[in-house]
Image (cartoon, rainbow, N blue to C red):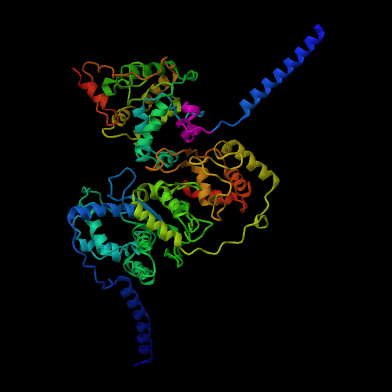
Amino acid sequence: MILGMSRRFATFSFLLQALLVWFLCSGAGAAPRFEDSMAQRVLACTACHGDQGRAGPDGYYPRLAGKPAGYLYHQLLNFRDGRRHYGLMTRMVDPLSDAYLLEIARHFSALELPYPPPAPVTAPPALLRRGEVLARQGDAARGVPACTQCHGTRLTGVTPDIPGLLGLPRDYLNAQLGAWQTQQRRAHAPDCMAQIAGRMDATDVSAVVAWLAAQPVPAPASPAAVMPPTPPGAPRWRCGSAPAVQAAGERP
Amino acid sequence: MTRAGRALAVLVVLLVGPGAAVWWLGVRDAPEATDAAAPIPADEARARGAYLAKAGNCVGCHTRRGGATLAGGRAIATPFGTVYASNLTPDAQTGIGLWSADDFWRALHHGRSRDGRLLAPAFPYTSTTRITRADSDALYAWLMSQPPVAQANREPALAWPFGTQAALAFWRALYFRPGVQASDPSQSAQWNRGAYLVQGLAHCVECHGARNALGALKAGGAGGGQLALQEGYAPSLHDRAEAGVADWPLAEIVAFLKTGQSARGHASGPMAEVVLQSTQHLSDADLQAMATYLKALTQVPDAKPSGQATVKPTGAARVQHGARLYEDHCARCHGERGEGVPGAYPALAGNRAVVMAQTTNLVHAVLHGGFAPATAGNPRPFGMPPYVLVLDDADVAAVLTHLRTAWGNAAPEVTELDVNRVRAAQAR
């Protein structure tokens, strides 16, 4: 009787397990279903920029998730209107309206996803020290402001227009500063980043890029809500893509 | 007269006579009576001009990417070199600020600039010549009300001798006759309005028509045209197997022009730009008229059903490779059996754009992906990723061959060469 019970139980248990396995397999194996959502609409973006816009694997497709919406929106407009140059991006955004581009920007901006740890540091310590000085204090002699002056004390950006500088691959940061120096990348005038990049030499660029790429992203990674106060005596900047910069400089 | 003298005289007559005839045919302004339309109030003319400019998508060519509207500078690629669209703003020095309504009419109708220079037919005056004087004046009134922008015109970069006045005179003698669209009394007013819009302002044939070696439109109308630099193929409007709409319900044609979207697929590439900047802004009455005309276009006889016999069998390995690529990259959106998702992703099974003889647009779709145009009627389109960096030419050929031969589709294979031609032209 007991034996019979246990055999029946064993059969039942086996069936249960089989059912579970079938359920799990069918769940995991089925193609994701179509849904009428923004995530579905922007599959064209995440194919290169990584799942949910976490960044592509090779360092050239930057993260989109959690960046300030105004910043992302301006970049989409810049590609469409020829201020930034990447043929595939331009084709992608060409037939889209301002309203839809803003909706796409807000979609990615609202995603809160963990950041991976930074890549192992390979740069020499002296270079990293110079990079940290540039990032935190700037170089007054050359008229280069600290990164933190506009990108936030924690360098996670400032809403709505200023991007964070951490959690970005070294190759990407290098390419962007280089593109600003050669005017391949532009923003709305006055183009403050073009002016700043133009005052940096090759060593400055590699130093600040090496240091930024080596920093872990603080938690929470969300951008600051207000601009940090401009240090006393620091020059005022005007940025066409980020009106808050000028406003901060004018605060008493 | 000596024999040598006679021979010379004959030679002169033989050369000068036809030369003069060509010159006269090329540069004359046909002495046409311009309609003495009753003048309309200025603001009404400007409003009408703004609408007509949408119908003609003037802004599309006459605006550089990111540049000031209508200030020109956009490069128009042709097989003979590049022409840069001119500044149409009323700036006195660089635009058309000093032009009169007569000067403007002369450009639109006769293809000649204010100074009498013959214009290169990249400016589609072979179509705009059909526009009425009243519409030309309305367009002029609107253009003159736009903000002036100082932006110098850029000289065309055409291979010699194509940009010379002599070459243009010769070309015009052969291929250009000025003339306003004549109305066809045997057709309805709606058909006539549609014919006027399609053949005149909208200049559809300039892309949808095939061209000869000298860049002139061949007889036979909008029978399908290959765009320069492999930028795309504008399918035939006279062929049910391409973009002919004789079998479409009228409402569906109107909806396509208004939203860029239909149950059969969506506008892409240059046509997406046309829908975005032009047709979505037209009145329902005008879209109905265009649809009526397009639907009534004569259609070429249907080709014999392209049975499996006409399809070259491809190697088993290649077929498998194509099917596997489809599974990995396409099936998630386009469905296991190419059924698509209505309103989001076009079906590939039974889609004429997939089985069309010309494969340029298919290759573009896979290489560059993209979104349907975001129109008022379809404001949040779905997108397709680009595969130009993911799939090589052999992969693209295999997956496209799969699409063209699976689920009842039966079209010839796509070769690596077909893919490479597009990829190489785009990389230039």
Q: How many circles with numbers are drawn on the protein?
A: 0
Taking the image as drawn, is residue A184 in sight?
A: no
Would residue B1 be found to the left or right of residue A7 on screen? left
| Residue shown at 46% from the left, 21% from the top | A113
Q: Residue furthest top?
A: A2
Would residue A90 be found to the left or right of residue A198 on screen? right
Counting from the top left corner in percent of width and height, residue B8 is at 36, 85
Q: If the image is split into quadrants, where does the N terminus of chain B sit?
A: bottom left
B332 versus B134 height, above or below? above
Asked if residue A35 is among those painted magenta in the image, a careful observer would answer yes
Q: Residue furthest bottom?
A: B1
Would residue B61 be found to the left or right of residue B143 on screen? right
Counting from the top left corner in percent of width and height, residue A47 is at 51, 33
Q: Which residues are magenta?
A: A34-55
Compare residues B92 and B19 and report the one nearer the observer: B92
Q: Which is the main secondary structure of the residues drawn in magenta?
A: helix
| Residue shown at 49% from the left, 42% from the top | B368
Compare residues B97 and A235 and report the one nearer the observer: B97
Asked if residue B245 is among those painted magenta in the image, a careful observer would answer no
Counting from the top left corner in percent of width and height, residue B14 is at 38, 82
Would residue A116 be found to the left or right of residue B197 on screen? right
Q: Quadrant of residue A74?
A: top left
| Residue shown at 50% from the left, 38% from the top | B385
B256 versus B165 height, above or below? above
Taking the image as drawn, is residue A172 in sight?
A: yes
Counting from the top left corner in percent of width and height, residue B224 is at 48, 59
Compare residues A91 and B426 and report the one nearer the observer: A91
Q: Quadrant of residue A252?
A: top left
